Image (cartoon, rainbow, N blue to C red):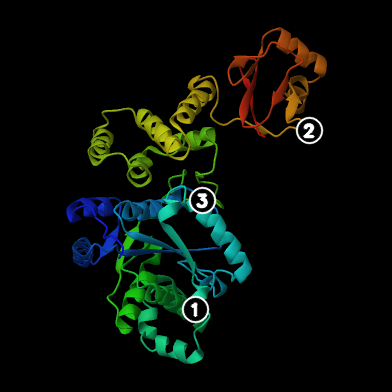
């Protein structure tokens, strides 16, 4: 017989789960499930559905992953459900049109990529990944009719995007109604106790509760997390909008992008993206409300914290130093041109060729003269050798004189 697990007290667990959550539906039932799991020594099954059409993870995705990690750290079982079957249906997910369907092969590849990145947040030894094609492909047409009989068209049209499209006369295909039902069957198959998702998934998660009850199961608890605004402070974080901070990015890029967020997002980023204690989080909120601290100081703290989470403390210190070299001098403009040079086979570029290619010097002889006069710097460090071959492994700033700057990209 397997040994029973031990879990933190319910109040302690709920403090974790409430932080940064939008809704817990219903919260009283979650408390009862937690009490039962402590009494029985059995973990709850906590489910998160993955969209395999978007395999690259940024900080916006980590909001729900971090919440999942909290359940994991409290001893519960985490299930990542790759929607390889449901992705072949297509889902609007709040959009005005259906997302294009994918092949099963594409979804499997993307699912593995997502898992590899997600386990930078989750404990890989305690994370189980499953594919919903394993059970959904086995359903017969009779099964599908039976499932559909448990939900009405009227309730389907309560979903915001369906309702808007119906009222505006835009077409809604019957197969789109199948998506939330298919997702609900994932919860039935896995006997999920809890399902997590962003606020844009609330309707689908509620359908899961209804279908579980129809199959004689205790309905899952729903916990939703907010959608995180990107570095522009307006739109949801997205790679397509280029307002994202990637978890695979270099420490310099991660720190620099964090420093670019508007002040109004500082608290939200601390709350949703870090593990700082509740008391410190409360203090940050007070400081921002009272204007008792320079927001730049808090952004620096946030930048270091995020880099430490996905890299190392040393990398965080170096990223901040790199940022200081480029931005602390007020003579350096925030918006400078970028240049990607032709790099030799050994991964370097000749400083003179770099200067002429970036149009920082009109000729090789002028480039040499500028270097000899001490007017050329790389990330604030003076260049003294015009035979220098620079490695181009990460971005850096080339400065010529006091006013000319260009960001060199690998």
Q: Residue at x 54, y 75 (%)?
A: 89
Q: Earlier in the sequence, mark 2 or mark 3?
A: 3
Task: Report the side of 105 relative to 310 (left or right).
Answer: right
Residue 136, disc: 1
Inter-mark Cα distance, 1 to 3: 26 Å
Q: Earlier in the sequence, mark 1 or mark 3?
A: 3
Q: Position of residue 298 (x, y in %)?
A: 35, 31
Q: Nearer the viewer, residue 64 or 372?
A: 64
Residue that badge 3 annotates: 117
Up the image or down, 337 lies above or below 4; here it is above
**How many numbered circles are shown?**
3
Question: Crowdedness of circle 2 by 10 Å Cα count: few (<14), some, many (20+)?
Answer: few
Rendering quarter of residue 399? top right
Circles 2 and 3: CB distance less than 8 Å? no
Circles 1 and 3: CB distance less than 8 Å? no
Residue that badge 2 annotates: 345
Q: Position of residue 123 (x, y in %)?
A: 41, 51
Please say whether residue 370 is visible from this viewpoint: yes
Query: What element does badge 2 sit on?
Result: loop
Residue 292, disc: none
């Amino acid at each position: 017989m397997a040994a029973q697990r031990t879990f933190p007290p319910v109040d302690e667990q709920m403090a974790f789960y409430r932080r940064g959550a939008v809704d817990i539906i219903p919260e009283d039932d979650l408390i009862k499930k937690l009490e039962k799991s402590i009494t029985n020594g059995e973990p709850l099954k906590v489910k998160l559905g993955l969209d395999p059409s978007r395999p690259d993870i940024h900080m916006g995705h980590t909001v729900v992953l971090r919440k999942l990690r909290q359940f994991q750290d409290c001893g519960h079982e985490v299930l990542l459900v790759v929607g390889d079957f449901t992705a072949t249906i297509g889902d609007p997910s709040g959009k005005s049109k259906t997302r294009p369907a994918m092949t099963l092969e594409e979804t499997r590849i993307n699912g593995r990529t997502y898992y590899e990145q997600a386990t930078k947040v989750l404990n890989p030894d305690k994370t189980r990944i499953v594919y919903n094609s394993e059970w959904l492909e086995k359903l017969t047409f009779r099964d599908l009719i039976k499932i559909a009989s448990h939900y009405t068209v009227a309730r389907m049209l309560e979903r915001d995007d369906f309702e808007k499209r119906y009222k505006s006369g835009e077409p809604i295909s019957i197969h789109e109604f199948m998506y939330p039902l298919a997702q609900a069957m994932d919860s039935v198959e896995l006997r999920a106790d809890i399902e997590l998702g962003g606020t844009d998934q609330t309707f689908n998660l509620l359908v899961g509760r209804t279908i579980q009850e129809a199959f004689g199961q205790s309905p899952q608890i729903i916990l939703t997390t907010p959608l995180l605004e990107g570095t522009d402070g307006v739109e949801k974080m997205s790679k397509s909008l280029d307002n994202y901070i990637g978890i695979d990015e270099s420490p310099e890029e991660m720190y620099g992008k964090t420093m670019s967020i508007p002040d109004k997002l500082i608290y939200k980023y601390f709350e949703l993206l870090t593990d700082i204690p509740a008391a410190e989080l409360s203090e940050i909120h007070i400081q921002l409300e009272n204007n008792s601290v320079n927001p730049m100081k808090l952004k620096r703290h946030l930048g270091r914290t995020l880099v430490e989470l996905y890299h190392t403390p040393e990398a965080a210190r170096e990223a901040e130093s790199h940022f200081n070299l480029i931005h602390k001098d007020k003579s350096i403009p925030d918006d400078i041109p970028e240049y990607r040079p032709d790099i030799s086979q050994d991964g370097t570029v000749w400083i003179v060729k770099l200067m002429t290619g970036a149009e920082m010097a009109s000729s090789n002889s002028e480039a040499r003269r500028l270097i000899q006069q001490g007017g050329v710097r790389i990330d604030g460090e003076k260049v003294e050798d015009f035979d220098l071959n620079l490695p181009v492994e990460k971005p850096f700033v080339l400065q010529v004189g006091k006013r000319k700057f260009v960001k060199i990209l690998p």
